[in-house]
Image (cartoon, helix red, strand yellow):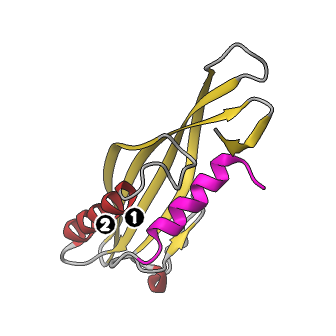
């Protein structure tokens, strides 16, 4: 078994694989391969996590808030902004189909979206970064099982 954080990340990868715009170009890394044949595509990774104790009885229950990033990449086209917005629509709607991440989490919320253009001239690309906060619980002595 693996840390619940990894299980959640795997769930998101499965949820976002096969979307209309990004199809199977979904990567579990913050280092995205910007090769032409792999665009448009998604990079999925966890950025940070905060935690606190919810109970005093040992083993205590730990409340965790995971910051999960979904980055959508496209190569430069006349409709770069429109394509990034379409990726956002598809990702947001797919993520909302199951905010519990198949029972691993209590909730999933989109908390921020940023858009950035990178490159110059004919080699322009765009990225849309969506930050999701995912709340889940574990016991302090077992980070592999969600409670």
Quarter of the figure that contains the C terminus: top right
Q: Residues within 10 Å of mark 2 (few under 14, many from 20)?
A: some
- Relative to 101, 3 lies left or right: right
Quarter of the figure that contains the N terminus: bottom right
Residue at x 21%, y 65% (from the top left corner): 81
Q: Tell me where residue 111 appears, x and y as whole percent.
A: 35, 40
Residue 119 is marked as none
- Relative to 48, 23 lies left or right: left
- Which residues, given as a range, are shown in magenta? 1-18
Q: Tell me where residue 83 appears, x and y as whole percent.
A: 25, 71
Query: Residue 110 is drawn in which quadrant?
Result: top left
Query: Residue 95 is drawn in which quadrant?
Result: bottom left
Residue at x 34%, y 42% (from the top left corner): 112
Q: Do the residues labelled 2 and 1 touch (CB within 8 Å)?
A: no
| Identity of the residue furthest to the bottom in this view | 37
Residue at x 78%, y 38% (from the top left corner): 142
**Alpha-carbon span between mark 2 and mark 1:** 11 Å
Identify the residue under disc 2. Answer: 90
Q: Is mark 1 on a helix, strand or loop?
A: strand
Whether residue 9 is situated above or below residue 125 in the rendered picture: above
Q: Tell me where residue 27 appears, x and y as whole percent.
A: 56, 69
Identify the residue under disc 1. Answer: 72
Give the number of the mark in front: 2 or 1.
2
Q: How crowded is mark 1: few (under 14 residues within 10 Å), some or many (20 or more)?
A: many
Q: Does the magenta stretch include residue 4?
A: yes
Of 63 and 6, the residue lying toward us: 63
Q: Is residue 32 magenta?
A: no
Q: Tell me where residue 59 appears, x and y as whole percent.
A: 78, 23
Of 37 and 144, the residue lying toward us: 144
């Amino acid at each position: 078994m693996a840390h619940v954080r990894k299980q959640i990340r795997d769930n998101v990868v499965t949820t976002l694989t096969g979307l209309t715009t990004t199809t199977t170009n979904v990567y579990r890394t913050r280092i995205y391969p910007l090769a032409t044949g792999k665009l448009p595509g998604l990079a999925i990774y966890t950025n940070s996590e905060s935690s606190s104790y919810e109970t005093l009885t040992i083993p205590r229950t730990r409340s965790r808030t995971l910051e999960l990033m979904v980055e959508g990449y496209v190569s430069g086209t006349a409709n770069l902004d429109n394509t990034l917005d379409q990726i956002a629509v598809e990702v947001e709607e797919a993520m909302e189909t199951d905010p519990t991440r198949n029972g691993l989490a209590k909730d999933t919320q989109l908390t921020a979206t940023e858009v950035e253009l990178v490159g110059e001239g004919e080699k322009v690309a765009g990225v849309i970064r969506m930050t999701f906060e995912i709340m889940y619980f574990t016991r302090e002595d077992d980070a592999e099982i969600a409670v």
